[in-house]
Amino acid sequence: MNSFRSASLLRPFVARSHRSHPMPRAGNPADAAAHSERHQGGWEIHYRLEPALEKFAGSARIHCDGEPHCELSIFEPQANALASIDLLREQCLAWIEGRAEGAAQRSLSAG
């Protein structure tokens, strides 16, 4: 069961791409691809994809205000680069949302 809930507050507010290489395409993989996006609250997600047997594996690093917080990986390669980024984005947004909920609960219990 997927416990992921919509994180509408965490949608990218700047459609900014920091690609160091073009995104690889299935069937014609490039060496590696990088993509970054910014989210509200100072969060940034940096994706890095690697071709893996005609599929794409990768990882995402989560930063807030320039400080690294977490790195998540794809353990099952996806059919294409976009599917890989979508899966990583979903995992990252769930992690950010969980962290925000935990901070809210701690502040309520402290007050």
Image (cartoon, helix red, strand yellow):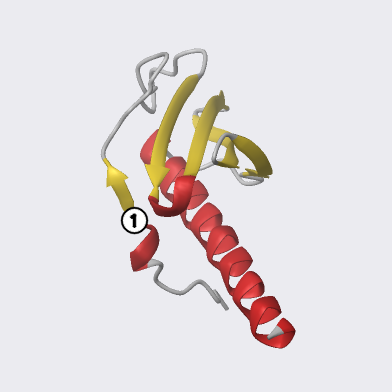
- The percent coordinates of residue 14 (x first, y second) are 28, 41
Q: Is mark 1 on a helix, strand or loop?
A: loop
Residue displayed at 57% across by 78% down = 1
> In the picture provided, is 72 more to the left or to the right than 80?
right
* Image quarter of residue 63: top right
Residue 36 drawn above or below residue 13: above
Residue 56 drawn above or below residue 42: above
Residue 25 drawn above or below residue 72: above
Q: What residue type is labelled 1?
A: Arg
- The percent coordinates of residue 65 (x first, y second) are 54, 40
Q: Residues within 10 Å of mark 1 (few under 14, many from 20)?
A: some
- The percent coordinates of residue 74 (x first, y second) are 61, 44
Q: Which of 9 and 27 is in front in this view?
A: 9
- Please name the residue that numbered disc 1 is placed on: 11
* Image quarter of residue 77: top right
Residue 24 drawn above or below residue 39: above
- The percent coordinates of residue 41 (x first, y second) are 45, 53
> In the picture provided, is 105 more to the left or to the right than 28?
right
Q: Which quadrant, please, contains the C terminus? A: bottom right
Q: Give the tally of numbered discs.
A: 1
Q: Nearer the viewer, residue 74 or 104?
A: 104
Residue displayed at 36% across by 65% down = 9
> In the picture provided, is 3 more to the left or to the right than 82?
right
Q: Which of 24 and 85 is in front in this view?
A: 85
Residue lying farthest to the front in this orientation: 111
* Image quarter of residue 36: top left
Residue displayed at 51% across by 18% down = 32
> In the picture provided, is 11 more to the left or to the right than 57?
left
